[in-house]
Amino acid sequence: MEKMLAYLISVGIIGFGIWIFIAGLDSSAPALWTCVALIPAAIGLLSAFGEC
């Protein structure tokens, strides 16, 4: 149960990064927001697949 919750949190963080990416495409500086979206997406991926 705890592992499933951890994966759900990771998926939520990745989803937040994707949401930033999609919202950033409509902005005046899409390249900036694409770079910003990489941060939570990378953190979510590290959280999901990384061993600490």
Image (cartoon, rainbow, N blue to C red):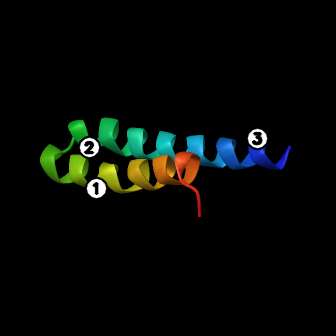
Query: Which quarter shows the C terminus?
Result: bottom right
The residue identified by callout 2 is 24
The amino acid type found where label 3 is placed reads Met
The amino acid type found where label 1 is placed reads Val
Q: Which of disc 1 and disc 3 is earlier in sequence?
A: 3
Please state the horizontal and vertical placement of residue 17, each as a whole percent of the image.
41, 46
Left or right: where does residue 37 sit relative to residue 33? right
The residue identified by callout 1 is 36
Element on which disc 3 rests:
helix
Front: mark 3 or 1: 3
Q: Work out how far the residue at label 2 is from the one at label 3, CA to CA, in angstroms.
A: 30 Å
Neighbours of disc 1 within 10 Å: few (<14), some (14-19), many (20+): some
Q: Work out how far the residue at label 2 is from the one at label 1, CA to CA, in angstroms.
A: 9 Å
Q: Which of disc 3 and disc 2 is earlier in sequence?
A: 3
Neighbours of disc 2 within 10 Å: few (<14), some (14-19), many (20+): some
Q: Residue furthest right?
A: 1
Element on which disc 2 rests:
helix
Q: Pointer 2 and pointer 3: residues touching (CB < 8 Å)?
A: no
Q: Residue at x 47, y 46 (%)?
A: 45
Please state the horizontal and vertical placement of residue 50, each as a whole percent of the image.
53, 53
Left or right: where does residue 5 sit relative to residue 46? right
The residue identified by callout 3 is 4
Q: Residue at x 70, y 49 (%)?
A: 6
Element on which disc 1 rests:
helix
Q: Residue at x 40, y 38 (%)?
A: 18
Front: mark 2 or 3: 3
Is 19 rendered above or below residue 51?
above
Please state the horizontal and vertical placement of residue 51, each as a whole percent of the image.
58, 57
Q: Observer-nearest residue: 29 or 46?
A: 46
Q: Which of disc 1 and disc 2 is earlier in sequence?
A: 2
Q: Pointer 2 and pointer 1: residues touching (CB < 8 Å)?
A: yes
Query: Which quarter shows the N terminus?
Result: top right
